Amino acid sequence: MFFFGVIRLYLNADECVRLVNACDPGFRNLVRGALLTGCRYSELTSMNATDFNPDAGIVTVRTSKAGKPRHVVLTDEGQALFSLLTTGKSGDELIFVRPDGGRWGQAHQLRPMIDACKRAQIRPAISFHILRHTHGSTLAMRGVPLGVIATQLGHADTRMTEKHYAHLAPSYVADTIRAHFPKLGINGDSKVMRIRNEMAKG
């Protein structure tokens, strides 16, 4: 994971597994959905069964922050989750529901997330939104083009994507420099003399 001050920007793979395992059963699928799609809490909790298209392997976000719908690509793991959660449901039924069958409210994720982080020993505790950043960060570190990440997350253009994830993407400049700059042999047990010591002897 990364820290900026005390803010955790994303979870690594091991932390993702620990967090999911530490979630209460009724909250676990919502966390899984966020990690596997990069969708916002409000987007996930408003999805209906008809929004999942198993033939195309996508889920549609009909009302996004940008004000227009988008199609989120699902991995095999994501498709398996959405298939499980939509089996037997009619098209207008919610995909993600509370343990009592009700709708997730605006702040209903706060306490379950804090509790799960405590059990998973993730400190400081993360907000639900960090799951979205984890999805984007994971794609960036695997070399997925920023334009593709922007489409997946629903960014209007790549500026927001670059702001959050460009520093994590494999860099052509960095890779080229590291591949071509020669090894100088000036580290470790070398015979390079310290100028200050030589001057002191004089």
Image (tube, rainbow, N blue to C red):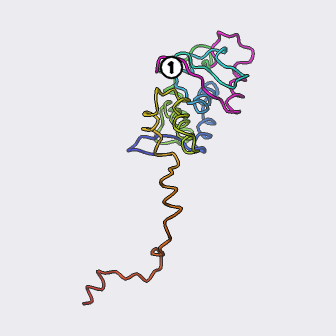
Q: Give how far across and how far down residue 23 sits, in percent.
A: 60, 32
Task: Name the quadrant containing residue 74.
Answer: top right
Residue drawn where x is 69% and y is 26% of the image: 57
Residue drawn where x is 52% and y is 34% of the image: 147
The residue closer to the viewer here, 184 or 58, is: 184
Q: Answer above or below: position of 93 versus 71.
A: above
Which residue reaches farthest bottom?
Answer: 202
Q: Give how far across and how far down residue 73 sits, in percent.
A: 63, 28
Residue drawn where x is 56% and y is 38% of the image: 119
Q: Answer above or below: position of 161 versus 175.
A: above
Residue kind at label 1, given as amino acid type: Ser
Residue 51 as seen in the image, left or right of residue 162: right
The residue closer to the viewer here, 108 or 58, is: 58
Over which residues does the magenta segment extend? 66-95
Q: Which residue is mark 1?
A: 64
Task: Name the quadrant containing residue 142.
Answer: top right
Residue drawn where x is 55% and y is 45% of the image: 141
The residue closer to the viewer here, 201 or 177, is: 177
Q: Is residue 106 magenta?
A: no
Q: Give how far across and how far down residue 90 sits, in percent.
A: 70, 10
Binning the other alpha carbons within 10 Å of mark 1 as few (below 14), some (14 to 19) or many (20 upward) gives: some
Q: Give how far across and how far down residue 96 sits, in percent.
A: 62, 20
Task: Kindly state the secondary structure of the residue where label 1 is placed.
Answer: loop
In which quadrant will I find the C terminus? bottom left
Q: How many marks?
A: 1
Q: Is residue 92 magenta?
A: yes
